[in-house]
Image: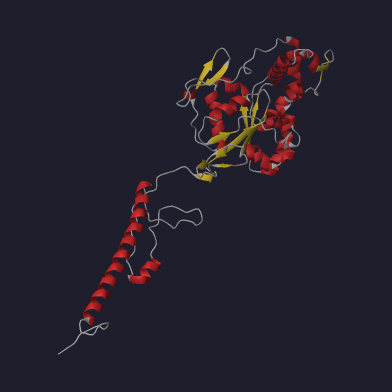
Amino acid sequence: MAYRVLGRAGPPQPRRARRLLFAFTLSLSCTYLCYSLLCCCDDLGQSRLLGAPRCLRGPSAGGQKLLQKSRPCDLPGPTPSEPSAPSAPAAAAPALRLSGSNHSGSPKLGTKRLPQALIVGVKKGGTRAVLEFIRVHPDVRALGTEPHFFDRNYGRGLDWYRSLMPRTLESQITLEKTPSYFVTQEAPRRIFNMSRDTKLIVVVRNPVTRAISDYTQTLSKKPDIPTFEGLSFRNRTLGLVDVSWNAIRIGMYALHLESWLRYFPLAQIHFVSGERLITDPAGEMGRVQDFLGIKRLITDKHFYFNKTKGFPCLKKTESSLLPRCLGKSKGRTHVQIDPEVIDQLREFYRPYNIKFYETVGQDFRWE
């Protein structure tokens, strides 16, 4: 006869131990399964919210090794700290390049770069019109104001200059205009030191008409200045023109061009006719686009002639409900000048004009 002793396991002990071991193993397996499903579903949920494709796990190794090696499904795209792995071949849709971000994490379009092209002159030649017209092109981003970096603010440094520029994508051209660069002796060397590949645009105009326009603008701000005739000549009787007056000196294009050709080849300088910009804006802007190496997108359909101002304006676009014309300071009625004074100035400029035509290989027909 067998007796059960308190505190000791009888014959049923091995069966009970096996049951306990099986229950423990099953509990551990269920725990791991729930953990794995929870992690994977969380990542899949994020992927669906972001519009990303579902990711698949590799085959499980089982047991403790799988717990150590397993990781959440990878979301597509790079993380801030490590580059993304090459993705599987797929048809990639074109997208804007994003560069930089603010502290809140929202991305900013493009990067501030030093300009690849400059409108360097000339004052009262039509530089503002060229700037406004070329800004319509999606591959060009331009600074709206004149920074005067290479003449007045050079001491502030290139980092300051770059900070003024609009953000651009790698496919876009950064451009700025400051007409006084063309007559600044140091400007060609300074621009060359920034980049010898800089493309230069010069808008020129009949120097006599340009001088009268320059004087008209100054007179609107300073009504007490001397007459145009008094400022133009040192001795009217002898026909001695005062070349120290800036309005006269700017129009001596051949003289100023010599400084630029010491640093830049003629192929890197494009000359826009201020007269043709009025009569054929699409043609002139087409040549500007060719020079910049961008597609001809600015065409006749972008312009209409404003009879009040006497020059072309941009038609309204999808982003603008109104047509775009230059400001009130553009298109002023010129001061009436004695025709004899005009004839004397034409004779003065004639040799400079002829030399300019020969140098650039264009006849602007100012005579």
Q: Is residue 302 left or right of residue 347?
A: left
Residue drawn at x 54%, y 22% as measured from the top left? 280
**55 vs 69: above or below:** above
The single residue placed furthest to the left in the displayed view is: 1
Q: Is residue 47 left or right of residue 144?
A: left
Residue 165: image quadrant is: top right
Residue 111: image quadrant is: top right
**Residue 252 in sight in this render:** yes
Instruction: Name the one closer to the observer, 102 or 31.
Output: 31
Instruction: Name the one closer to the observer, 143 or 251.
Output: 143
Q: Position of residue 307 (x, y in %)?
A: 55, 13
Q: Position of residue 350 (x, y in %)?
A: 73, 22
Q: Position of residue 34 (x, y in %)?
A: 31, 61
Residue 275: image quadrant is: top right
Residue drawn at x 49%, y 44% as measured from the top left? 97
Instruction: Name the one closer to the observer, 266 or 72.
Output: 72
Residue drawn at x 53%, y 17% as measured from the top left? 305
Q: Is residue 67 left or right of residue 246?
A: left
Residue drawn at x 57%, y 18% as measured from the top left? 311
